[in-house]
């Protein structure tokens, strides 16, 4: 390399690199090369032209930037109030209404005064801003002054608490007038920014269904979390699925729709039914001094949830306060598992009927105990009932006969039916936080033959209240298991996407469902008379379950459940009532606690849903009420 540079310097000791390049690339023949002075003058002219071109270009760009800054500072800073979803750090969210259009949650807009403190340079200017805001919006002048001083070097600060719309307009008018009188007023460094604030006008009502949002506007629990991406103004839409016009919704349901965001939900929840079950649940918890409870109302033919309530509940408007009890936020209907106890016997009996190992009149012997897998199983009262039909055994809630039925069905078929009824997996409801429950089956390392006996009457497995009510709904729905859901329709602008009921599978045959309904009617009429409602045939079953603890079960602590449907011949609703640990000094048995609550809620549902008594409905249909065939008459 050194020799190469040496050769170049030797070849032309006086030529500049540019001159050497020009000489080397000239197209002129030898003998016609320009003189040295001529080449230098031409190069100097080119350099001078380039210099002035770049200088002019730089000056032009600088002028454009300065002009834009002047226009922004003097004329545009105060114009931040125009609604534009893209200007929010966190976007607004759509509204949620019940099936009749009652508003359950929506964004309402507040307006935050903002400032550019580093542009308000003098104490006099700060004082002027503070006095004007105090006179117009009631923000203490001392508070504004302190904020402007604390952020004196900053480009952004929030002044006072967010204002309502009326006050924000007064501030805008004051600012406009001040800038009209004197364009250099320091108020030009003040702006108003709209802020979406989530509001739950029904307070605690349906709180576990709705959930709430965090400071970053992300949904937590319930619908707010499950439909977070849809409710978000910048989130997903209806995608490519077929939709219909917003006009397809009843006018009453459209009262608040579409919202300004245009991403809304219409629920299956009926606000009136929700109010009824929450009131009765509070009363029941107080009356029996329980630690908590759940009530669910479902349409058996579709899986639509009409009401879902848990106690304790919470107010999503106040969930961020220091007094908030975070343990209340989880939806116990879908996330708290428990051993269901004797309500699970309807699954065992249904499996026995469907496999034809029993009929409703099959007679079995109750000797007071049975040994399965080396474990002795007893009735809850430790008594022997002798020869009984399986219908009587269900009405009397006999563990021994139920275990015998499970043994006849066989372990493989028994657990197939347990799965068919949806246990051991999530129902797929559109609420965040659902769990699948706990179910051991043959082949699991912890399963043993004794589990077949105890599982038959709801011990040794764990379910959610939603799974239990959905399994009962399958019996009311001629054996078809549906997916529960709480959103009737999604709305995007002027388009609506309705939720189509989805059948998860067939749990039992229609004739089995008919036999089970008759057996459950007899259970209410003779075994759970506190659940009866005059004038209506009701199909149901109670369950009193012990609570597992380390080394066994808790003493004198139970979870009580009653689940049923009505009217039995044409089921309009399935209802589950559950209480956690009622005071044993009052009663720890389902027949004396949740059965009466079930009856009271049913009475109110008959009125709310305008369901006539059996006799009147039979007269209208022109049939003898005594001949009404449950289930089949609904076909």
Image (spheres, grey):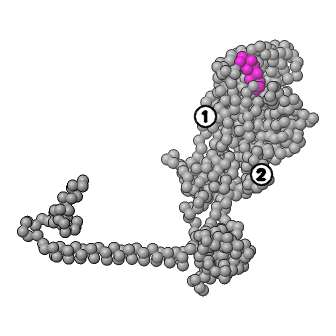
- Residue at far left of view: 31
The answer to whether residue 634 is magenta is no
- Residue at far bottom of view: 181
Query: 496 or 40, which lies in front?
Result: 40
> Which portion, as a residue range, is magenta?
448-459
> Residue at point 67% right, 39% down?
434
The relative height of residue 428 versus residue 116 in the rendered view (above or below) is above
Q: CA distance from mark 2 to mark 1?
A: 39 Å
- Structural crowding at the residue carrying mark 1, measured as other residues with C-alpha within 10 Å and reported as few (<14), some (14–19) or many (≥20): some
Query: How many marks are shown on the rendered structure?
Result: 2
The relative height of residue 229 versus residue 288 in the rendered view (above or below) is below
Q: Residue 564's spot in the image, x, y percent?
A: 76, 33
Q: Which mark is residue 324?
A: 2
The answer to whether residue 458 is magenta is yes
Q: Main secondary structure of the magenta part?
A: helix
Eye-nearest disc, 2 or 1: 2
Q: Which mark is residue 4?
A: none
Q: Which mark is residue 503?
A: 1
Could you tell whether 230 is left or right of 539 in the image? left
Report helix, strand or loop for mark 2.
Answer: loop
The relative height of residue 323 versus residue 382 in the rendered view (above or below) is below
> Residue at point 49% right, 47% down?
240
Q: Residue 256's spot in the image, x, y percent?
A: 65, 58
- The quarter in which the C terminus is drawn is top right
Dot 2 or dot 1: first in sequence order is 2
Report helix, strand or loop for mark 1.
Answer: strand
The relative height of residue 513 versus residue 11 in the rendered view (above or below) is above
């Amino acid at each position: 390399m050194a020799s190469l540079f040496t050769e170049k310097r030797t070849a032309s000791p006086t030529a500049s690199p540019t001159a050497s390049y020009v000489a080397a690339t000239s197209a002129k023949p030898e003998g016609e090369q320009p003189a040295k002075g001529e080449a230098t003058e031409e190069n100097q002219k080119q350099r001078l032209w380039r210099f002035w071109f770049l200088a002019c270009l730089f000056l032009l760009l600088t002028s454009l930037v300065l002009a834009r800054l002047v226009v922004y500072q003097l004329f545009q800073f105060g114009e931040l109030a125009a609604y534009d979803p893209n200007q929010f750090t966190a976007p607004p969210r759509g509204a949620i209404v019940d099936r009749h259009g009652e508003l359950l949650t929506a964004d309402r807009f507040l307006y935050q005064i903002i400032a550019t403190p580093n542009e308000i340079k003098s104490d006099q200017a700060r004082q002027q801003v503070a006095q004007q805001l105090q006179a117009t919006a009631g923000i203490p002048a001392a508070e504004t002054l302190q904020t402007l001083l604390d952020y004196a070097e900053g480009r952004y600060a929030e002044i006072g608490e967010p204002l309502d719309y009326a006050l924000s307009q007064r501030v805008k008018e004051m600012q406009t007038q001040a800038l009209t009188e004197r364009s250099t007023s320091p108020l030009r460094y003040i702006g108003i920014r709209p802020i979406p604030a989530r509001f739950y006008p029904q307070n605690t009502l349906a709180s576990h269904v709705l959930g709430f949002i965090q400071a970053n506007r992300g949904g937590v629990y319930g619908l707010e979390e499950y439909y977070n991406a849809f409710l978000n103004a910048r989130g997903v839409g209806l995608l490519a699925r077929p939709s219909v016009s917003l006009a397809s919704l009843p006018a009453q349901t459209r009262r608040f729709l579409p919202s300004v965001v245009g991403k809304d939900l219409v629920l299956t929840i009926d606000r009136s039914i929700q109010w009824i079950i929450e009131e009765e649940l509070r009363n029941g918890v107080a009356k029996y001094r329980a630690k908590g409870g759940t009530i669910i109302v479902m349409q058996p033919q579709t899986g639509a949830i009409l009401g879902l309530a848990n106690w304790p509940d919470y107010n999503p408007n106040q969930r961020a306060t220091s007094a908030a009890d975070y343990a209340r936020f989880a939806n116990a209907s879908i996330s708290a598992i428990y051993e269901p106890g004797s309500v699970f016997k309807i699954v065992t009996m249904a499996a026995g009927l469907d496999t034809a190992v029993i009929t409703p009149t099959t007679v079995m012997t109750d000797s007071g105990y049975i040994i399965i897998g080396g474990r002795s199983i007893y009735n809850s009262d430790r008594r022997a009932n002798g020869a009984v039909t399986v219908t009587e055994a269900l009405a009397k809630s006999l563990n021994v006969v139920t275990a015998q039925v499970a043994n006849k069905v066989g372990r493989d078929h028994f657990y197939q039916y347990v799965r068919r009824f949806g246990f051991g997996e999530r129902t797929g409801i559109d609420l965040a936080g659902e769990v699948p429950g706990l179910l051991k089956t043959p082949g699991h390392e912890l399963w043993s033959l004794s589990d077949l006996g105890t599982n038959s009457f709801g011990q040794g497995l764990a379910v959610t209240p939603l799974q239990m009510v959905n399994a009962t709904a399958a019996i009311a729905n001629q054996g078809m298991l549906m997916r529960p859901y709480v959103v009737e329709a999604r709305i995007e602008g002027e388009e609506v996407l309705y939720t189509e009921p989805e059948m998860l599978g067939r749990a039992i045959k229609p004739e089995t469902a008919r036999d089970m309904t008759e057996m459950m009617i007899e259970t209410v009429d003779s075994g759970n008379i506190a659940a009866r409602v005059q004038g209506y045939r009701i199909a149901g079953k109670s369950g009193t379950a012990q609570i597992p603890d380390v080394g066994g079960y808790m003493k004198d602590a139970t979870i009580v459940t009653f689940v049923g449907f009505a009217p039995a011949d044409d089921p309009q609703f399935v209802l589950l009532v559950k209480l956690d640990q009622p005071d044993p000094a009052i009663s720890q048995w389902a027949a004396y606690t949740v059965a009466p609550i079930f009856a009271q809620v049913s009475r109110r549902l008959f009125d709310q849903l305008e369901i006539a008594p059996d006799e009147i409905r039979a007269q209208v249909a022109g049939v003898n009420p005594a001949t009404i065939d449950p289930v089949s008459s609904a076909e």
